[in-house]
Amino acid sequence: MMLTREILVVDDDSSVRRVLEYHLEEAGHGVLVAPDGGTGFDLFTGNRIDLVITDIMMPEIDGLELLRRIKAMSPETAVIVITAHGSIENAVAAMKLGAYDYITKPFNREELLLTVDKALQISAVLQENRYLKQFIQDHFTLEGILGTSRKMRRLFERVKKVAGTDAPVLLLGESGTGKELFAKAIHQHSSRRDYPFMAINCAAIPEGLLESELFGHKKGAFTGAHADQKGRIEIADHGTVFLDEITELPLPLQPKLLRLLQDGEYNRVGETSAHHGDIRTIAATNRDIEKLVEDRVFREDLYYRINVVPIVLPPLRERREDIPLLANHFLQELAQRYNRPDLRLDKEVFRYFHQYPWPGNVRELKNAIEQMMIFSPGDVLDATGVPDHIKRPHPHAGNVLIQLPDEGIDMEEVERDILLQALKRNDWCQTTTAKYLNITRSALIYRMQKFQLREGQDKPNTTDGG
């Protein structure tokens, strides 16, 4: 169920208040109304308010003074001011004081609701960043990313050094290794910590919307663009932008990102005038980006621009000594969330945990413990509750007898044959095949595309250069 957003409307004109209240409540928002600035400020201080819409011209405490008080008390709260046609200079003054936008009388319902929705989105981002900064200050240090293994200690040192610079970072690692967590840690330990941290998953946003989401758009730039919109790059100005799954960025967008990284300039969709962006980029991928560059799927110049400082995050199977620490940490989190303070893990559980290859890494470990907790009637999570796929014996390369011929082998052909046999053995189920091969599902899909492997073929097609 979506949380109702609370909007405060302040206007000394009762008819304006009624119109705004009607439209906003029809759109599903909660609305409080006030006839003057003093009453409005009292309501703001006594309630959880997500957005304020205020007239500028009011007796005693006018809209500009109300705006000053609100921003002094809660800088992340978005404020929209109301102005009449011909009084745009008042709106400009309000924007300089921190107002998000303005609307003019008489109101257009569609434009009103669009402006409100965008303001609420911006407010949510700012509130999340404030919460994130406060949470990190209270609970999170770099060492709080759990791990005492030698690999993790070396990784912490590398992250500390790069955090103090403004250099672009490329985080490399399998899915579930905590790339976004490390990106947030780098941001928090940087000189940009007081500005936004904006995470953008390049694979999660439809290709047709990605440019607008990144750079913003001008009103009328395309169907549905009813108003100017800031992009996430602009919202994150002076802060850090985390480009997750950077290799999924469409090829036509790559030179536009390169321009931003090289020159600090970008254009909103539908605009010819350039905007300046001051951001620090941290990119991440779980794919073989060098191979994608070789295959000309990813631009070489962009690769070198984002890859100033590469940081490789080790998979969980390469730091098994951290498993007990992580497992008990997740158990404590779950015990608090589900109000089961006496939960504990039986030692026998770790025998299975240590032999399992963890293709989903830390994320899979957390999910396994939560599953055990849900289905366990008691407080001791023992080996009987360990998921079956973790209990099963897992093949290791060392168990495979390989006899190399004197005349040598074609490594590409061997890899194709292994993949094809594994897929057939597992009825072409990608999830079980990936677990069988001890690789991630995304790595399997990449290799299937590389060798043009499709269900039903007896022999993979030969490719030229991958």
Image: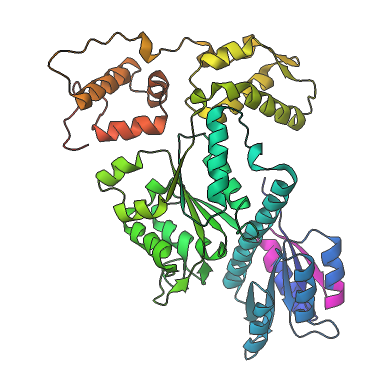
Coordinates of residue 241 in the picture (x, y in percent): 52, 55
Q: Left of 213 or right of it: where is 407?
A: left
Image quarter (top left, top right, bottom left or bottom right) of the N terminus = top right
User: Is 297 included in the stretch rendered in magenta?
Assistant: no
Q: Quick check: can you spot residue 36?
A: no
Image quarter (top left, top right, bottom left or bottom right) of the C terminus = top left
Coordinates of residue 205 in the picture (x, y in percent): 46, 51
The residue at the point 63 percent across, 42 percent down is 142
Q: Quick check: can you spot residue 454?
A: yes
The stretch of residues the image draws in magenta is: 23-39
Coordinates of residue 300 in the picture (x, y in percent): 30, 52
User: Is 31 included in the stretch rendered in magenta?
Assistant: yes
**Quadrant position of residue 196:** bottom right
Q: Nearer the viewer, residue 424 or 149?
A: 149
Q: Left of 465 or right of it: where is 361?
A: right
The residue at the point 39 percent across, 57 percent down is 208
On screen, 439 above or below 384?
Answer: below
The residue at the point 59 percent across, 25 percent down is 322
Q: Nearer the viewer, residue 23 or 69?
A: 69
Q: Left of 427 or right of it: where is 185?
A: right
Total numbered badges shown on the rendered structure = 0
* Coloring basis for residues: rainbow
The residue at the point 75 percent across, 20 percent down is 343
Coordinates of residue 456 in the picture (x, y in percent): 24, 23
On screen, 78 above or below 245?
Answer: below
